[in-house]
Image: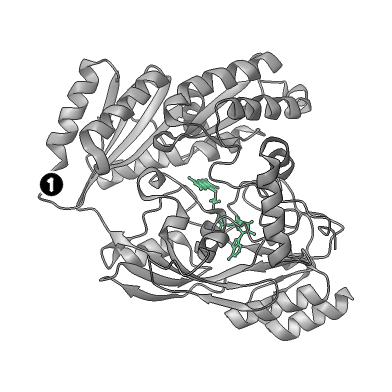
Amino acid sequence: VTSKAQLELRTALGEAGWITGIASQPYTEDWLKLSANPALGVARPNSTEAVADCVRLCREHHIALVPQGGKTGMVLGSVPGKPEQATVILSLERMHRIEHIDPIGGTVCVEAGVVLDQLQQVLGENNLQIPLHLGSSGSAQIGGLISTNAGGSHAFRDGMMAEQVLGLEVVLPSGDIWQGNRALLKDNAGYALRRLFCGAEGTLGIVTRATLQAVNKPADITTLLLSCENLENALALLGLCRAHTGKLLNAAEFMHAVGVNWVTQHCRDVSFPLESVPPYTVLLEFVSPNAALQLEPIVDHLLSEAMQRELVSDGVQASSEQQRAAMWALRESIPEGQRLHGRQLKHDVAVPVAQIANFIAAASAAVQNIMAGTLVNPFGHMADGNVHFNLSPPAGADIEFFERSDAFNKAVYDTVVQFNGSIAAEHGLGRAKVALADRVRPEVERALMRTIKAAIDPSGFMNPGVIVHMDNDSH
Ligand SMILES: Cc1cc2nc3c(=O)[nH]c(=O)nc-3n(C[C@H](O)[C@H](O)[C@H](O)COP(=O)(O)OP(=O)(O)OC[C@H]3O[C@@H](n4cnc5c(N)ncnc54)[C@H](O)[C@@H]3O)c2cc1C
């Protein structure tokens, strides 16, 4: 059956659209390189109709279909789940056309395989941008960003990816094409279908085209890197920013000394601009929509109050675009620094903003109880409560540390639940967190998700094993 299916897929997709064997291997591994299960082949359609053909063939032949964007997801959603399951990866990489920019309406229509940085570059030429900023923007695709409902540094003000999506075109598991690609903010004609696909992680269909909101680029930007002795001070600083600058606040990111030190040790070309690495470093950014609204006096006033209240012990302001980029490179290299340091346990969680310090203290105590000396690297998007609470073993204790992975994960996620937080803030559940969600989320909520999955993908071949486990997961 599979060789017949492969032949039909090759015929439908053409030579450039169907890859097998050694050439398909790079598609089986994502950024984290945690698994590399084989695929029957990689479909690389270059049109929505070709996507629909591929979907129909996979369904008919009972082959699991895994949609793939830039492979920067953190929860194993874009790569085959099981070695024994016949799986086709559907890469959107050939669908990368930016089709229409409307500077008056502030919208852009793109195919799903467009990479975020490339879109920002083209929009920038029209003085526009998508209000989404994240460290994977050089590889992450619009379809992947929509399907994970990506967050990033501006989410506290501009919302997550779903907020940027006005319309979508989606190939459904039936092979039908849903033409919902409207450039409309207000479209309440029934259930919010476009929302359903934001964060669906490829389990309900394949996003092929989207219309997104684009906003004007700021006229002025001020970026600062500040030292804080503790997180309580960092949070008080955030409160001051909200009070003094309102919507001008563009980012409020925090990093722990453990993560900053790994970046300076392992990432070439990234340096720390202050004299010494403090317990917590905060990156603040402010933007002004109009040159007439000057940031300087507003930020000066904020900083003088922060110094007076001893919230900040040192700091530097970017005086060029190069320095600003270097500050962001530091923040965005934290995941890479820890990856280069060695194996780790990642936890992408969210708690109410004012509880961040309490949560980190409680979760740190819980993991130290399991193994003293565990290296805790908390960092993230302070203004929306999103904490990346990542753990690495003490030197020389890798084996004992990873033997206790389940205990570490349980301790962290149980603490999240105590704080009424989320076990999956911006990376989604993928394959990695399904059992966890079944354990800690309300059963009514999980049952509702299974009902939605069964209704839209009754044969269960669309990214099986992601978000929910279904009885028909194994084809
Ligand atoms: C260094 C680094 C920093 C990061 N920072 C952030 C951050 O700040 N905020 C954040 O939210 N995430 C962050 N991420 C995670 C990641 O970049 C996002 O989850 C991103 O949205 C994934 O996009 P992608 O194109 O790489 O998708 P992939 O990883 O290829 O796929 C992700 C999921 O979407 C599905 N999918 C992909 N394309 C489609 C499609 N067209 N239709 C249907 N389903 C599809 C896949 O099946 C999979 O389940 C970071 C990752 C890295 C490596």
Q: Secondary structure at mark 1?
A: loop
Residue occupying image coordinates x 16% and y 35%:
298
Above or below: residue 133 compared with residue 309: below
Quarter of the render that holds ligand 1: bottom right
Residue 119 percent location from the top left of the image: 40, 65
Residue occupying image coordinates x 27% and y 15%:
310
Above or below: residue 98 compared with residue 464: below
Look at mark 1 in the image and give the residue it sits on: 293
Horizontal placement of 438 versus 334: left or right?
Answer: right
For the N terminus, the image quarter is bottom right
Residue occupying image coordinates x 15% and y 53%:
290
Its colouring scheme is: one colour
* Label 1 Cα crowd, 10 Å radius (few <14 / some 14-19 / many 20+): few
Q: How many marks?
A: 1
Residue lying at the far right in this picture: please name it.
1
At label 1, the amino acid type is: Leu
Residue occupying image coordinates x 61% and y 46%:
74
For the C terminus, the image quarter is bottom right
Question: On the image, which quarter does residue 147 sit in?
Answer: bottom right
Residue 63 percent location from the top left of the image: 80, 69
Residue 470 percent location from the top left of the image: 79, 55
Residue 193 visible in the shown view: yes
Residue lying at the far left in this picture: please name it.
292
Disc 1 under 8 Å from ligand 1? The reply is: no
Residue 264 percent location from the top left of the image: 47, 31
Horizontal placement of 372 versus 151: left or right?
Answer: right
Question: On the image, which quarter does residue 314 sit in?
Answer: top left
Residue 371 visible in the shown view: no
